[in-house]
Amino acid sequence: MFNKNIVQCFDLPNVVNSLIEVKDKLVDSLNDLARMVSGNILSHQRESIMALLTINVHNRDILLDMIEQQIKKVDDFMWTK
């Protein structure tokens, strides 16, 4: 889902603003997951949510790098980071 959302940004007129919108939604998702993991849930649920948090934090960091570097084309960024 993350890659799909990012690639779609490159088809829009203002790529950087589109990336910022994706970042904002990702941060909202991180906040939701953080609330969930701090709730009263089973250990296997907590482990799954923590795994999602880890992946999404990594995605957020990549996205922040892309925004900071003003990436405007899919070929401008090292995706395999």
Image (cartoon, grey):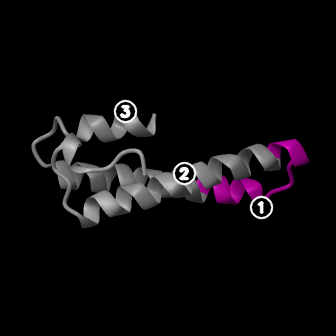
Could you tell me what secondary structure mostly forms the magenta stretch? helix
Magenta-tinted stretch: 32-45
Q: Distance between the residues labelled 2 and 1?
A: 17 Å
Local packing at callout 3 (Cα closer than 10 Å; few below 14, some 14-19, many 20+) is few
User: Residue 29 at what x, y percent from top left?
Assistant: 53, 51
Identify the mark nearer the N-term, 3 or 2: 3
* Amino acid type, mark 3: Lys
Vertically, is 56 above or below 68? above
Left or right: residue 2 versus residue 32 is left
* Element type where label 2 sits in the image: helix
Quickly name the residue at label 1. Answer: 38
Q: Nearer the viewer, residue 79 or 61?
A: 79
Left or right: residue 7 versus residue 35 is left
Residue 40 included in the magenta stretch of the image:
yes
Q: Do residues under tags 3 and 1 come within 8 Å of each other at their CB atoms?
A: no
Q: Residue furthest left?
A: 13
Left or right: residue 7 versus residue 30 is left
User: Residue 60 at what x, y percent from top left?
Assistant: 45, 57
Identify the mark nearer the N-term, 2 or 1: 1
* Element type where label 1 sits in the image: loop
Discs 2/1, front: 2
Say which residue appears at 80% left-offset and 48% top-offset: 47
Identify the mark nearer the N-term, 3 or 1: 3
Q: Distance between the residues labelled 3 and 1?
A: 29 Å
Is residue 2 visible in the rendered structure shown here?
Answer: yes
Q: Do residues under tags 2 and 1 come within 8 Å of each other at their CB atoms?
A: no
User: Residue 61 at what x, y percent from top left?
Assistant: 44, 61
Q: Which residue lies furthest to the right in this view?
A: 42
Quickly name the residue at label 3. Answer: 4
Q: Which of 78 and 69 is in front in this view?
A: 78
* Amino acid type, mark 1: Ser
Quickly name the residue at label 2. Answer: 56
